[in-house]
Image (cartoon, rainbow, N blue to C red):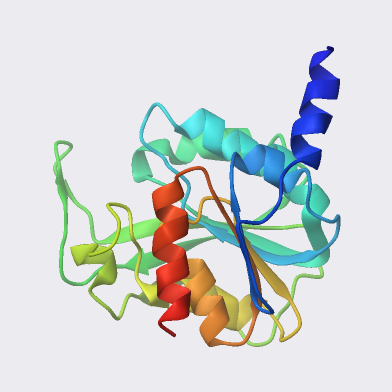
Amino acid sequence: MPEIILQELAASMISPVYQDDLTTLYLGNSKDVMRKLQPNSISLINTDPPYLKGDVKDAYSILANESYRVMADNASLTTLVGHFAIDEVILIMSRSKLKWNWLIAMNQPIVHAKMPLGIEVTFKPILWYAKSNTFLKNTFMKDSFTVEEMDGILKPLYPWQQSISWANFFISHLVNRGGIVLDPFMGSGTTIVAARKRGIRSIGIDIDPKCIDITIKRIRSI
């Protein structure tokens, strides 16, 4: 059977593993699931892809190749990235149709990693892209913010867990009620939980069943 037919067959078999009025969760490869989503339907993609050195190309290539189609005309994409990978990620994302907007700094006031280069790391960079020049602008959005919780430092649920204020910052500025937020690499579900607490619909995708379980437990505890 030709590969393209196999890909279409696999996509047609993808169905949510959890769904209610606000939240839809998929277990699977982000590329396959994103190809199933409706075009022009997503208001914000907010995500923290795996960016260890061996994962950068695969993860960000999915964002570059699959995001434009599913994003609404005024939609944004905000993605965390490791400092060491910024140059590679920007090159990968430049191959997409998305418009580069800005670099946002997520300040971490408590724990500062010290790198061999002689750098004390005080913030995490977030790259902001948009589908067009008509992205949502409710208010002026500062190009830095400070995390307010310890979740992203203590990481009680997942090794790569982020603080809820990370997701809240972008959802509050870039999504209107009625919009849909997507996290294609949802991990412990921080973006999903933040959207749910604000009454915003969201879609989460992860290839790890443990991430699905963690996210379901978190949304059921709200």
Residue at coordinates 66% horizontally, 56% vertically from top-left? 16
Number of marks drawn: 0
Residue at horizontal 60 percent and vertical 56 percent from the top: 17
Where is residue 167 drawn, in percent x and y? 48, 72
- Residue 47 visible within the image: yes
Residue 28 image position (x, y, % from top left)? 59, 42
Q: Nearer the viewer, residue 201 or 68?
A: 201
The part of the image, by quadrant, that contains residue 115 is top left
Q: Position of residue 38 (x, y in %)?
A: 84, 56
Q: Quadrant of residue 91?
A: top right
**Where 185 falls versus 96 (above or below)?**
below
Who's the residue at 40% across and 26% down the image? 54
In this view, 149 is above or below 182: below
Q: Could you tell whether 95 is left or right of 59 in the image?
A: right
**Visible residue check, residue 132:** no
Of residues 47 and 136, the one drawn nearer to the viewer in this rendering: 47
